[in-house]
Image: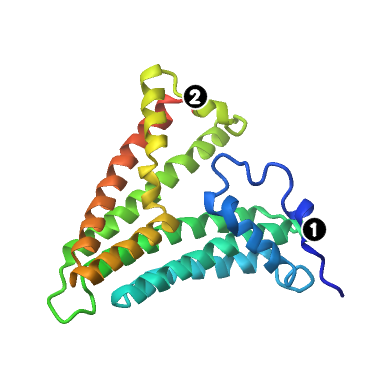
Amino acid sequence: MSRPSVAELRPVVHPAGVKDRRSGEHWMGRLYMREVSLRVDRYLVNTRVTPNQLTYLMTLCGVLAAPALLVPGVWGAVLGVVMVQLYLLLDCVDGEIARWKKQYSLGGVYLDRVGAYLTDAAVLVGLGLRAADLFGSGRIDWLWAFLGTLAALGAILIKAETDLVGVARHQAGMPPVKEVAAEMRSSGMALARRAAAALKFHRLILGIEASLLILVLAIADHVRGDLYFTRLGTAVLAGIAMLQTVLHLVSVLASRRLK
């Protein structure tokens, strides 16, 4: 059976709106990964590989970012970025294969969310263990492992705060939330949210962006000759995660999403 061309795949696996989703599409997906995934799709659409199998593989790649980051030096950070990029690629491919084969399931949606939770947490826990110098010659400093885990907890809680809006609305018999409902009811809160969105500091605790930051920190550490920048980054991300957890909760409660 001949493989479909990219031109044949595109209108089916990239229907209108896929790349424009406000919270469902990562900027790297829009920038380049959706084009890469189309080339991968060609080799999978005529196989027995299922979307859920790809989602399991996606999650495994994301979780493996944590042990990858334990490799000392810049190469560990590079390996972490590679694992997270594979996660992002498979995150695109599983949905595209599902559209082509018309193999949709709630289980697939659920597994995709679990994969996102685990990947964000794995990268930040891996950062903390890396900062603790787990395999170094000196004493392991568990404070940094704790801060990395704290950052991971914040990243998970923020996702949970978003997802629990849908749970609350479903249990109340209400329809899914619309994007307009995310708007703040007070002008002050709306201004604060726009300012936070413009700064985009909250993205630093997402697994994809965090992996790139870790690579930059690793290069700086290589130049300096110690773990100063990795440890500084761990502390900063832990602070951002805790602050964003509170701010996001306030944002949800101050919006129309629960009305």
Mark 1 crowd level (few <14, some 14–19, many ≥20, 10 Å Cα): few
Amino acid beneath label 1: Ala
- Badge 1 marks a residue whose secondary structure is helix
Name the one closer to the observer, 236 or 50: 236
Mark 1 lies on residue? 7
> Residue 93: in sight, yes or no?
no
Please tell me which of labels 2 and 1 falls first in the chain.
1
Image position of 188 with respect to 204: above or below: above
Q: How many marks?
A: 2
Q: Residue at x 54, y 33 (%)?
A: 169
- Badge 2 marks a residue whose secondary structure is loop
Image position of 182 with respect to 229: above or below: above
Q: Residue at x 53, y 68 (%)?
A: 86
Q: Residue 185: where, in percent of width, then height?
A: 44, 19
Q: Residue 49: where, in percent of width, then height?
A: 71, 72
Q: Residue at x 61, y 53 (%)?
A: 109
Image position of 234 with respect to 134: above or below: above
Image position of 132 with respect to 149: above or below: below
Q: Spatial distance from mark 2 to mark 1, Cα to Cα? A: 41 Å
Point out which mark residue 256 bears. Answer: 2
Residue furthest right in the image: 1
Residue 26 is left or right of residue 225, and the answer is right
Q: Residue 138: where, in percent of width, then height?
A: 13, 78
Q: Which quadrant does the N terminus fall into?
A: bottom right
> Residue 81: in sight, yes or no?
yes
Amino acid beneath label 2: Arg
